[in-house]
Image: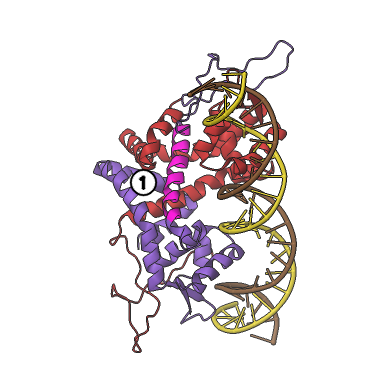
Chain colours: A red, B purple, C brown, D yellow
Amino acid sequence: MADVNIAAHSEGAAEEVTTADGSKGPVTAPVTIADKPEVVLIELLFYAYRDFVSDPDAVLVRYDFGRAHHRVLHFVDRHPGMRVADLLDILKITKQSLGRVLKELIDTGFIEQVPGPVDRRQRLLYPTEKGRALSARLTEPQARRIGAALAALDPAGRVAAERFLRLMIDADERDKVSRLISR
Amino acid sequence: MADVNIAAHSEGAAEEVTTADGSKGPVTAPVTIADKPEVVLIELLFYAYRDFVSDPDAVLVRYDFGRAHHRVLHFVDRHPGMRVADLLDILKITKQSLGRVLKELIDTGFIEQVPGPVDRRQRLLYPTEKGRALSARLTEPQARRIGAALAALDPAGRVAAERFLRLMIDADERDKVSRLISR
DNA sequence: TATTTACGTCAGCCATATTGACATATTTCG
DNA sequence: CGAAATATGTCAATATGGCTGACGTAAATA
């Protein structure tokens, strides 16, 4: 069963067949890319992301961590000294969801909390050496995948791919994200 | 707190500061895009996907469905008559995980099962009219988002964006995915 | 006939997310 | 100064979506 074997569709018509008694049967006509050309990109994004996130999973299981730990560690490593609120705004999850995952990363010594020097209510988040090392290790396969894909494009194509992804972000988040990324 | 306010980094050095007593403090140097240029794409993919999947959520809650239902309904709608095994191979989940979600979609009349006409062990999956309508409704905001992003690119850029996503898929899955998409 | 295949299901478990309420510092504002 | 807002943490209950493992059944196939 290594191969997906979706049967060819016998129906040539674009419309559903209504049976003799007037009841509606199942819809047999496929949604074609001619109908909705954007479906190609919708599905490519699904498949690409599916494989993209699968990369680090193999590493994470050895640490008893999940994808949530990966995300948290990545952004803390990327933005040392960030506030908890910043992290929540990036991940778009609640503080309760973040709580346990962050606690585990702190308890196991991958992330450290430091009281904000100016505003002492804050608990600024920093990676430890160990945290940085793990983050790098998780980034590696993803960077390799990205690098290989970009290498197959010409410079203009690389710019276009990046632009496309930027435009996929909510319009009212784009500037914030751009500022975060370009550090 | 509408704005993320990550403090500028006081450390100019690329390396960690070791304190006087020899103990390692937290790592304060950020990972820059100069260090790892692929990080830009890694993060863009995260942000883009985050917002991309958030679109249908607002619709789904009204049906008491989650993202898993969306994925199942989408692919059944896209490939009417597909087998359960095909769906599992696309989603890369176990049949037990699929089980509940699929059952709910069947029980609520969005998907129909038909015994395979040639191989009667199979339960071929079809959307109902209702299922097709919901799928279209869920696809709509995503297609709008994609369409807007593509509209901002020139034809070559559109090709590049699509090529990039194709290349992000596992090499040994690309042909299968291409066959699935180009229907 | 024996085996494999396609699918379903039961049971238990884990990870990640949610809402809502409440606690504790600390900063800021009137 | 005192009140209010802010940053964060935590307890509790719940939902969702995923997993492994075991077992069952019908149907195709070797």
In what quadrant of the picture does the N terminus of chain A appear? bottom right
Q: Which residue is mark 1?
A: B163
Q: Residue at x 62, y 42 (%)?
A: A96
Q: Position of residue A101 (x, y in %)?
A: 64, 40
Q: Is residue B100 shown in magenta?
A: no
Query: From the viewer's perspective, is A74 left or right of A101?
Result: left
Where, by quadrant of the figure, is residue A115 drawn? top right
Q: Residue at x 45, y 31 (%)?
A: B3
Q: Position of residue B144 (x, y in %)?
A: 32, 51
Residue A147 seen: no
Query: From the viewer's perspective, is A151 left or right of B85?
Result: left
Secondary element under disc 1, as helix, strand or loop, is: helix
Region rendered in magenta: B38-58
Q: Is residue B53 shown in magenta?
A: yes
Residue furthest bottom as drawn: A21
Query: From the viewer's perspective, is D21 left or right of A150?
Result: right
Three-letter amino acid code at disc 1? Arg
Q: Residue at x 60, y 44 (%)?
A: A97
Q: Is residue C11 above or below residue A50?
A: below
Where, by quadrant of the figure, is residue B129 drawn? bottom left
Q: How many marks?
A: 1
Q: Position of residue A65 (x, y in %)?
A: 66, 43
